Amino acid sequence: MTVLDDRDRWLRGVSAPGARIRLVCFPHAGGAASYFHDWAALTPPEIEVMAVKYPGRQDRLSDPCPTTMEELADAITEALVHGLADDLPLALFGHSMGSAVAYEVARRLESVPGPTLTRLIVSGRARPRLAHEQPPRPAPTDSEILDHVRRLDPEGAAVYEHPALRSVIMPALRGDFGILAKYRPTHPHRLGIPVTACGGDRDPVCAPEDLKSWSDVTSEELDIRIFEGDHFYLAPRRQELLTFLGSQLE
C-alpha cells in the first residue's frame, strides 16, 4: 500500500491552498468522517479541515474494526506522519470517543518526527481514566449500547430502529464501545501543548465540571468553553463552535 493510499484510507478532506494550519477531526463512537463534511466551508480559508475515517463504516464498511485504542491510534498516527506530504502544523479536535482517540494520537505525535502539533481540542468527554481510577469493564451488550445512544441522541438513535440499517451500522458502534470499555492508559501523560475542552451545558454524560479533568494531561494551559446544548451541541451550535475554534488556532 502506498503512502497516498494510506492517507486516503484514513483521512478525508479537501486541500486548502494557502492554509497555515490543519485541523484534524475525530468522530464520536459510531460516528464517521462525514459528520464534519461541512466544516471546511464554514471555517476561515487559512484552516484546512480533515476528518478521520474509522474502519467499519461508510466507504470503509468492509474493513475490520480495531479491537484496542492502541491499534486505532497507531494507525491514525502513521497516516498523519507518513500520509501528509507537507509540514503544515496540526491541531486535533475530537468529540466524545474522538476526544480519547485524539489524545492518544497527540501522545504519539509528540514522540515521533513529523508535523508540529499545536493544540488538542476535546469535546463532550472527561480525560481518560486510569485503571486504578476506573477498572476496565466488559464490553456492553447491544441493548446497553443502544440505551446509551438513545440517551445522548434521541433523534439520531432512530436509525437503529430499522432492522436492515441496524445490521449494517451496529458492528462499528459495537466495536467502538468495546474499545472504550477496556481502554485505560497505564499512566497520565502530560502533553507539551495547550488543551481546549468544550462541552454542552446540558450534556447528560459530561458535565461542565468534568472538563476540568483535562488539566491533568497538559503542562500548558487548559481553556474551557461551554456551549448551550446537550451532548451533541455541535450541530445546533456549529457556527458558534467553529468561530471559537478559529480563535483558538490563530
Image (cartoon, grey):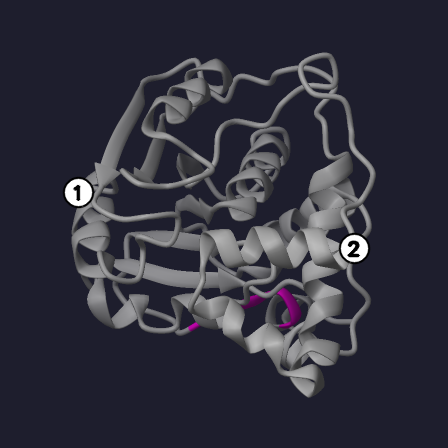
Which residue is nearer to you in this view: 13 or 240?
A: 240
In this picture, residue 87 sits left or right of residue 75: left
Which residue is nearer to you in this view: 234 or 191?
A: 234
Mark drawn on residue 110: none
Circle 1 Cα neighbour tier, 10 Å, few/some/many (<14 / 14–19 / ≥20): few
Residue 119's x, y, as percent? 38, 35
Q: Is residue 223 visible?
A: yes
In this picture, residue 221 sits left or right of residue 186: left
In this picture, residue 201 sits left or right of residue 231: left
Q: Is residue 27 visible?
A: no
Q: According to the image, label 1 marks what residue?
A: 247
Determine the image quadrant of residue 17.
Answer: bottom left
Chief SS of the magenta region: strand
In this picture, residue 242 sits left or right of residue 139: left
Asked if residue 12 lies in the magenta stretch, the reply is yes
Give the CA distance from mark 2 to mark 1. Answer: 34 Å
What range of the chain is rendered magenta? 9-13
Q: How many discs mark residues in the rendered view?
A: 2
Q: According to the image, label 2 marks what residue?
A: 66
